[in-house]
Image (cartoon, rainbow, N blue to C red):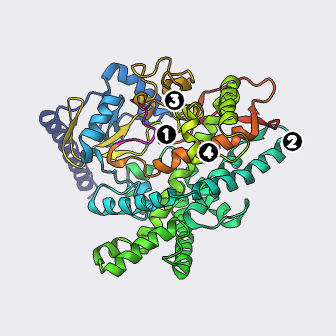
Amino acid sequence: MLLLNLLNVQTVLVALTVGLLVYVIRRRFIYRLPPGPWAIPLIGNFEVYTKPLVHRLILQLSEKYGPVIRFSFGPITTVFLNNYEVVMEALVKRKADFAGRPASVTFSLISEGYKNIALASYSPMWQYHRRVAMKALRNYLQGDLLEKLTQDNMTKVMNMMAAEAEKGPIELKSHLDNIVFYQLFTLCFGENKEIGDPDVEFLLREKDNVNEAIGNGLREDLLPFLKDVYPSKRYIIIKEAADRVFSFLNRLLQKHQETFDPNNIRDLCDHLLLARSEAEKSGDDESLEKLNDTYLVQTLSDIFFAGVDTTRLTLEWFLCFISGLPEIQAKCQAEIDKTIGRRCPSIADRQALSYTEACLYETMRAGVIAGLGVPHLTICDTQVGGYDIPKDTVVLINHFALHRDTKYWKDPEKFDPLRFLDENGKMDPTKLDSWLPFSAGRRVCLGESIAKPEILMMCVHLLQRFEISLPEGVKPNFAGVHRDVFGTESPADLRIVVKERLR
């Protein structure tokens, strides 16, 4: 019996090996695949994906293999796009070809089975939800609601920063979390919470738990069956946190439904309920089915959580550069003083704050906020850069490589806001090639229209009120520290000194 079992195991292993070889050889003959280093079957290029800062390593390897590189993350074939030309060909020229999203255990957990916008694959359902969310965001941007919200929230947090600064240099993370998290909470749910509110702190704590657990990815993402037979501790942490968060958000949605008034739209949650109300009145059963509670909660979760870390990291990198480059800070403050003085900034001031906005754009280029971004998936056989990309191939955009490309950026490691200005000192839209912090094409960031004016106003508020510097004896350090699998880096050990500016 033992011999028979061993023979059965050997038979299965031989069959698997032969099948894998046939599959690999067949792909070689049918497709002209992108080049890349040799990978161990099933294990892949472990010397790449087991290291931090993959985006930097891929950029180095692109000098050998070119802008389109093929790697294997375990058994998963992945293609990296490393320059502006191939990225635009894939995302803009080929449009929907690269608009899918890969399935993963982690993605499924944090989206209740891909029912949000960021992680759902390209489909009519996804297109519908994106249209509804975009309409809600556009309505939100009308009027002065964003300005009032930013002003109120920034005043609260800056008062806390000023009080803490009396004791010495301040740690930024908690203050930046407060700036971003409380603002997004009010944007989505209308409640203007005080700093320290237990509901907001609960969501902030759960967000940090999930981020820490995701880290460089779960083993279940490479071998999904493990979640059913031997789930990892990190998988359990993410699942339990997701369950708690979605239960909480469902309660908030229920409260909004009970007080919903189509003539008094208070927040983004109300805008989504309005879309459902309009579908009910029109008898549009198909649209109504697409706007059930789960999808509404996932859309709110998307807008709320997707913007938190990227916005906070942008502010953190902005303060890193500004505190280490006092001459650039002084130019921003001179522009702010001349344009605004001491009144509260508004979105209308944006046109007259070109230098400050150029500093924000340069922050998004030079700071590694999302080195790789969210992975794409090809939904059909397609091509890019002269190579064949088979259907269901995972594709990653190396934003870090785009933002360090010497073809577009002279001395790319230098922080230079003048890159984005014309000869009259105004923002020059023709200088934005290879600048893609929000991606492009069908999967361009949903919140881009809000993020750019919102973050600019946050930066203006900070520079208008404070002189920002490094502690005595500390030298500027613009090196990034690895954070997660998405190629995110944060400034190393950033503590700053803030002083009230003389009025």
Q: Quadrant of the C terminus?
A: top right
From this view, report whether residue 396 is shown above or below residue 326: below
**Mark 1 residue crowding within 10 angstroms, few (<14) / some (14–19) / many (20+):** many
Q: CA distance from mark 3 to mark 4?
A: 18 Å
Q: Earlier in the sequence, mark 2 or mark 4?
A: 2
Q: Residue furthest right?
A: 167
Q: Earlier in the sequence, mark 1 or mark 4?
A: 1
Residue 436 located within the stretch drawn in magenta = yes
Residue at horizontal 73 percent and vertical 59 percent from the top: 195
Q: Nearer the viewer, mark 2 or mark 4?
A: 4
Left or right? Give the position of 91 relative to 260.
left
**Mark 4 residue crowding within 10 angstroms, few (<14) / some (14–19) / many (20+):** many
Check residue 166 in the rendering and tell me which mark sits there, or answer none: 2
Left or right? Give the position of 151 relative to 27.
right
Check residue 457 in the rendering and tell me which mark sits there, or answer none: 4
Residue position for label 1:
370
Q: Nearer the viewer, residue 266 or 197?
A: 266
* Residues shaded magenta: 432-440
**Mark 3 residue crowding within 10 angstroms, few (<14) / some (14–19) / many (20+):** some
Q: Amino acid at mark 1?
A: Ala
Q: Quadrant of residue 317?
A: top right
Q: Earlier in the sequence, mark 3 or mark 1?
A: 1
Q: Amino acid at mark 4?
A: Met
Prevailing secondary structure of the magenta residues: loop
